[in-house]
Image: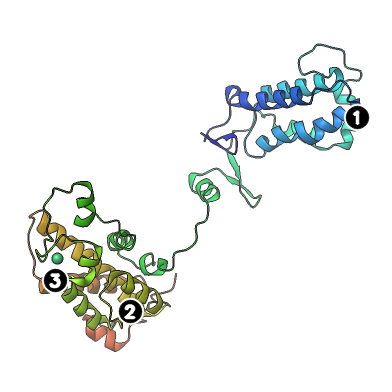
């Protein structure tokens, strides 16, 4: 696997991994082979073009000493004989050529030769130039493109979320749950019917929250947590909530937990009925997940300092003496 022409491997490079590097330098030399170039011209080529290739690799990876020697040999031959392979006599010993001191990169080159006394360590040069220990998370974050933040990100991925609820909500916002309208696309002969109301095949808009079972659940939830959105159309609800549920505030936090819980639990009940694992009525479903929310609130790291009495009363949360705020890290 390669990234920007460089092998992406987590261990150090072996000579065989560097074949491409050697080939690259060799093909440049063949391209530029030009008998009419003066020594100065060839030196210019070595320092500006040829040299940049291995330096680019060495900025990301340790290059084996053997490969460095091979590249140096090609460069020397090119400089003195206009060819990367032809044997010839160097006019001055490579290491004593005085102008090498004028091009400090030539000396740095030696730094990449492995020291047998020092344990190998794999490092990574990040996009900002910082060198860090190689670890998958650093490298992944460094390589991936930073996508544009979606406007509903705070509705789904907040710190106090219930993980499985957020995951289902995330799929639902992308409309990627396997609803029956999507399944029908694959198999048009299937006779599918919503397991909650039996009126038609289910879909995202049907489940969240247009039809009787769901609309009742959503209405109860909205009343309890005081969400002020009148819409029962899925996309409009998401748009309303992404504007309404901003900021760090215990009421908004509860609204976000309740929204994700509504979607999760309707989806769960739908599946439970569809796969004949059992059937709960709306009120039972609501009672179950209100209790889940209550337990979540009680278990929040830091305690209930940010809960006012109204919230405590509403959710049956005991009055406790805690010192930290829920939103503290
Ligand atoms: Zn239905």
What is the quadrant of the C terminus in the image? bottom left
State the residue at coordinates (49%, 48%): 137
- Checking the image for residue 213, the label placed there is 3
Picture quadrant of ligand 1: bottom left
| Residue sitting farthest toward the front | 188
Q: Nearer the viewer, residue 216 or 54?
A: 216
Residue 218's spot in the image, x, y percent? 21, 75
Q: Secondary structure at mark 2?
A: loop
**Mark sitting earlier along the chain (1/3):** 1
Asked if one can make out residue 179 in the rendered structure from this viewpoint, the answer is no
Q: Nearer the viewer, mark 2 or mark 3?
A: 3
- Checking the image for residue 158, the label placed there is none
Answer few, some or many: residues within 10 Å of disc 1's Cα (few below 14, many 20 plus, some between 14 and 19). Answer: few
Residue 214 in the image: above or below residue 25: below
Image-quadrant location for residue 88? top right
Q: Is residue 39 left or right of residue 55?
A: right
The reply to whether discs 2 and 3 touch (Cβ–Cβ < 8 Å) is no
State the residue at coordinates (23%, 80%): 315
Residue 145's spot in the image, x, y percent? 53, 52
Q: Is residue 329 left or right of residue 32?
A: left
- Checking the image for residue 40, the label placed there is 1
Residue tagged by mark 2?
304
State the residue at coordinates (7%, 63%): 279
Image-quadrant location for residue 244? bottom left
Q: Secondary structure at mark 1?
A: helix
Q: Is residue 63 left or right of residue 225?
A: right
Give me the C-alpha separation between circle 2 and circle 3: 33 Å
| Residue sitting farthest toward the top | 87
């Amino acid at each position: 696997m390669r990234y920007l022409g460089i092998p992406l491997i987590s261990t150090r490079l072996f000579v065989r991994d560097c074949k491409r590097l050697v080939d690259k330098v060799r093909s440049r030399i063949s391209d530029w082979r030009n008998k009419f170039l003066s020594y100065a011209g060839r030196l210019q080529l070595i320092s500006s073009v040829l040299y940049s290739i291995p330096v680019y690799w060495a900025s990301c990876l340790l290059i084996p000493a053997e490969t460095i020697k091979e590249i140096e040999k090609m460069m020397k031959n090119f400089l003195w004989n206009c060819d990367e392979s032809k044997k010839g006599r160097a006019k001055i010993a490579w290491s004593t050529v005085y102008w090498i001191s004028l091009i400090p990169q030539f000396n740095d080159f030696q730094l990449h030769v492995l020291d047998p006394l020092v344990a190998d360590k794999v490092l990574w040069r990040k996009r900002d130039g910082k060198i860090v220990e190689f670890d998958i998370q650093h490298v992944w974050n460094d390589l991936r493109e930073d996508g544009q933040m979606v406007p509903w990100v705070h509705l789904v991925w907040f710190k106090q979320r219930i993980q499985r609820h957020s995951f289902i909500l995330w799929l639902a916002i992308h409309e990627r749950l396997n609803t029956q309208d999507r399944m029908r696309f694959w198999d048009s002969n299937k006779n599918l019917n919503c397991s909650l109301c039996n009126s038609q095949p289910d879909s995202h808009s049907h489940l969240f929250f247009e039809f009787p079972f769901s609309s009742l659940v959503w209405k109860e939830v909205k009343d309890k947590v005081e969400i002020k959105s009148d819409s029962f159309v899925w996309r409009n609800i998401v748009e309303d909530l992404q504007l309404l549920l901003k900021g760090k505030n215990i009421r908004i936090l509860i609204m976000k937990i309740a929204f994700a819980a509504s979607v999760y639990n309707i989806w769960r009940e739908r599946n439970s009925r569809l796969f004949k694992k059992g059937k709960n009525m709306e009120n039972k479903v609501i009672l179950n997940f209100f209790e889940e929310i209550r337990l979540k609130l009680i278990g929040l790291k830091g305690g209930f300092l940010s809960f006012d009495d109204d919230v405590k009363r509403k959710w049956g949360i005991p009055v406790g003496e805690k010192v930290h705020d829920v939103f503290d890290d």
